[in-house]
Image (cartoon, rainbow, N blue to C red):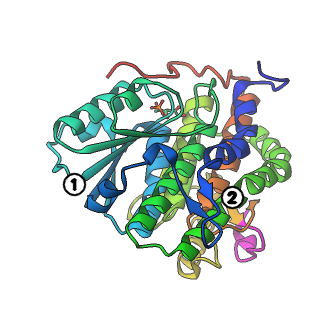
Amino acid sequence: EKGGWPSFMAKEVSEEPEAVANTIRGRVHPGAEGGEVVIPELDGLDELFVGIRHIIVIACGTAAYAGQTGAYAIEQWTRIPVSVELAHEFRYRDPVIGDDTLVVSISQSGETMDTLMAVKYAHEKGAKTLSICNTQGATIPRESDAVIYTHAGPEVAVASTKAFVAQITALYLLALHVGRVRGVLSAAESADHVRELEAIPAKIQRVLDEEQAHIEQFSHWMADTQSVLFLGRHVGYPVALEGALKLKEISYIHAEGFAAGELKHGPIALIEPGQPVFVIVPSPRESAELHKKVVSNIQEIRARGARVIVVAEEGDAAVLPFADEVLRIPLAGPFFEPLLAVVPLHIFAMGLANAKGLDVDQPRNLAKSVTVE
Ligand code: F6R
């Protein structure tokens, strides 16, 4: 079943390109400008999308980080305020929701009890519920008003990888569709974003082909590392959180993700000589200002002896003087970088766990689907 791969996780990381491609397939129509998102499952819901005033995304773990990533694009492309909440926190604070709220749940398994209970709660409060799910006919989509299935294929390894990129893809498709229905995006703008999205699978494949051996190599000499930090900003922030979660889960190494801007408000105190820090660097073409700020964060931690591993766009030379390792990702549009930047982090977590001789598919204390609250 592993098809020659050493683990399900290795197989599933290698399937990240097709997880994105299969989630897009059949949902893009030529349209006037060459790319309109039409999601057959959402037929008849246009009126609902026009009427909503608030979107709340609920999920747990990696699915919540996918939600946090997707929220930037949803807000930008639909101009509907979006908040993202951990499902298990959501229903214990009497949230302000009603029939103009769309609650979007995200779950690979579709069986996560925390997420299911939050969906039921939202439903009781009169909100509309839409689920993004990787498992046909699972409980969460059955309890929701609508569903968009991710087509990542079955995910067997406990740590979620290909489902993450598929979830972000589904959120972008939703955002583009709703943005068009509400008249926020022009046909031409939507088509541009669709083209960017359609180019992602081949770009992920390039990251796998070009960086895998390099990452596995340095993850080996990091096998006795005690702690790894991850920094990111804007859409790079949830990617940092995901990189840290994956490392904790499968390599049992302490890891934290931080918003890069938060560094001087506390976390910089953790930096001592030799501390490995991954930094997700924003594109200098897409956001020169954020890029400059993150490069200055890199200088600050480097000056305190951090071992800096940057994930940066091809051609970004500004990071070179301050980086111990540079992991390159292809150029992508403003919201699309996470789909590429997360790939080296998945490979790294797996490489480090392998270097420690751990079972990457079955990490201790964890189950694939958490069906208790
Ligand atoms: C992380 C991981 C978990 C799940 C979380 C939600 O690698 O696998 O954090 O993402 O338990 O699971 P689903 O998506 O099935 O609701």
Local packing at callout 2 (Cα closer than 10 Å; few below 14, some 14-19, many 20+) is some
User: Quadrant of the rendered structure where residue 164 is?
Assistant: top right
Q: Are marks 2 and 1 in contact (CB under 8 Å)?
A: no
Q: What residue type is labelled 2?
A: Glu
* Residue 282 visible in the picture: no
Numbered circle sitting on residue 198: 2
| Apparent side of residue 222 relative to residue 78 in the rendered image (left or right) | right
Residue 176, above or below 92: below
Region in magenta? 313-323
Q: What residue type is labelled 1?
A: Asp
Local packing at callout 1 (Cα closer than 10 Å; few below 14, some 14-19, many 20+) is some
Q: Which of 254 and 125 is in front in this view?
A: 125
Residue 68 location in percent, x, y?
Answer: 44, 53
User: Quadrant of the rendered structure where residue 310 is?
Assistant: bottom right
User: Quadrant of the rendered structure where residue 104 is?
Assistant: top left
Location of mark 1 (residue): 100
* Residue 357 visible in the picture: yes
265 inside magenta stretch: no
Going from N to C along the chain, the mark reached first, 2 or 1, is 1
Cβ of mark 1 under 8 Å from ligand 1: the answer is: no
The residue at the point 66 percent across, 65 percent down is 196
Residue 40 location in percent, x, y?
Answer: 51, 46
Question: SS at mark 2?
Answer: helix
Residue 239 location in percent, x, y?
Answer: 55, 52
Question: SS at mark 1?
Answer: loop
Residue 288, above or below 134: below
Quadrant in the picture for the N terminus: top right
